[in-house]
Image (cartoon, coloured by chain):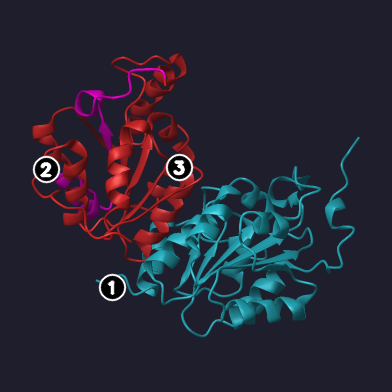
């Protein structure tokens, strides 16, 4: 395993801010189903020995892993894209919410602000209604200057109130994915 | 034309056993506060009926997530043995987790599959896996330390071996079509909280 990634403490990219805020809050277990937009974050997580980060075959599987880890005393967060979130309604409604698991989810928002794939734009519209129907806290992060505050406070609130939170990474923050490659 | 049950088992030299009996035999061997995750439905009903332990987690929904939840517990507490009990129909919903478990290779995780070839709880409809061998599927995912239990004595031997192993292990058992013996109380918050107390993560108020 590589040593801690250098010079992340003051770097102001969105992914450097997310990484150091995770670390400060002892969020060390990070399963993911990848997204192009998330690639720099995933790379830096793999490069930092503090994190145990790995791919799962499905997003639901990662929800199960993080639920078990929380119950065993270890904190984590799930990284995915919008279409992955759309597979989660049953696991959220039948496990995470009724068991009061402070599941922390980061969603790279696809399907808006320049989407080129109609299916992505449709599935994107299902995300907030699902979150709202379960009364789950969520924030859409569009600004770099608000990112650290939102991520840090949201993690602390999730743990303190034993309630899940979804942090949506807008293309306004990340640049999104705008070309068909 | 109806599909006969358990056709995939016909060629196997494995006895058809009973879920509650096997679960009771397993629980009787647990002397070190091992964590046990019971999958949805009959699997956790029989775990409940075998005698409540503070280290038991009973999954009330989220079909297919017993193995992933157990993996999470195993990663969080590497010094504790973790056992997951899952039905064949449930495992079919989340086969990919076998590959993830093989890749992470936790030393403290044992996976048990109770295979009756049917969705007993919904009316005993046959699963689509009439010609599948779940031990072979797991081996194909990289979980090479798996075996079918030939009979009850062999099941106990496999459990003894799994509890000492330093690689993830899988035990599959052919079981009959009997429903679960007990019924888990549907109290998810209390189930989760008691499990965390049992794992030493929480202290009572």
Confirm whether the magenta stretch covers residue A163. Answer: yes
* Marks 1 and 3 in Cβ contact (< 8 Å): no
| Mark 2 or mark 3, earlier in chain | 2
Q: Residue at x 42, y 59 (%)?
A: A68
**Vertical side of B129 occupied by B27: above or below:** below
Instruction: Report in which chain the residue with disc 3 lies.
Output: A
Magenta-drawn segment: A152-180
User: Can you tell which mark lies on residue A36?
Assistant: none
Q: Which residue is mark 2?
A: A11
**Vertical side of A17 occupied by B114: above or below:** below
Pinpoint residue A116: horizontal percent, then vertical percent. 39, 14
Whole-Å distance between the Cαs marked 2 and 1? 42 Å
Q: Secondary structure at mark 1?
A: loop
Q: Which chain is cyan?
A: B
Q: Which residue is mark 3?
A: A59
Any part of residue B28 in sight: yes
| Mark 3, other Cα within 10 Å: few <14 / some 14–19 / many ≥20 | many
User: Can you tell which mark lies on residue B204?
Assistant: 1
């Amino acid at each position: 395993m590589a040593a801690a990634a250098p010079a992340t403490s003051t770097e102001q990219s969105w992914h450097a801010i997310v990484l150091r805020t995770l670390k400060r809050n002892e969020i060390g277990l990070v399963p993911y189903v990848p997204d192009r937009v998330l690639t720099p974050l995933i790379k830096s997580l793999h490069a930092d020995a503090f994190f145990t980060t790995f791919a799962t075959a499905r997003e639901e599987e990662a929800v199960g892993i993080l639920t078990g880890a929380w119950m065993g005393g270890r904190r984590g967060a799930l990284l995915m894209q919008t279409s992955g979130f759309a597979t989660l309604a049953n696991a959220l409604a039948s496990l995470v919410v009724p068991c009061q698991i402070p599941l922390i989810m980061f969603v790279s928002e696809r399907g808006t602000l320049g989407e080129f794939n109609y299916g992505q734009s449709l599935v994107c519209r299902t995300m907030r209604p699902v979150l709202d129907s379960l009364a789950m806290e969520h924030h859409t992060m569009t600004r770099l200057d608000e990112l650290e505050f939102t991520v840090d406070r949201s993690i602390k609130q999730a743990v303190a109130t034993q309630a899940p939170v979804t942090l949506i990474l807008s293309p306004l923050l990340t640049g999104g994915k705008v070309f068909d490659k | 034309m109806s599909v006969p049950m358990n056709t995939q088992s016909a060629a196997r030299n494995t006895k058809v056993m009973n879920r509650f009996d096997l679960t009771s035999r397993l629980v009787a061997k647990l002397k070190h506060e091992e964590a046990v995750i019971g999958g949805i439905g009959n699997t956790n009903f029989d775990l409940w009926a075998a005698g409540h332990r503070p280290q038991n987690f009973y999954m009330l929904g989220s079909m297919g997530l017993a193995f992933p939840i157990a993996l999470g517990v195993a990663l969080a507490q590497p010094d504790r043995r973790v056992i997951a009990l899952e039905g064949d129909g449930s495992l079919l919903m989340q086969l990919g987790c076998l590959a993830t478990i093989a890749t992470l290779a936790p030393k403290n995780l044992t996976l048990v599959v109770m295979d009756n070839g049917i969705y007993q709880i919904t009316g005993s409809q046959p699963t689509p896996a009439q010609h599948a061998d779940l031990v072979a599927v797991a081996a194909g995912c990289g979980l090479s330390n798996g075996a079918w239990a030939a009979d009850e004595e062999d099941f106990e031997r496999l459990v003894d071996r799994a509890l000492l192993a330093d690689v993830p292990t899988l035990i599959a058992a052919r079981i009959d079509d009997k429903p679960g013996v007990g019924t888990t109380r549907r109290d998810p918050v209390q189930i989760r909280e008691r499990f965390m107390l049992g794992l030493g993560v929480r202290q009572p108020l």
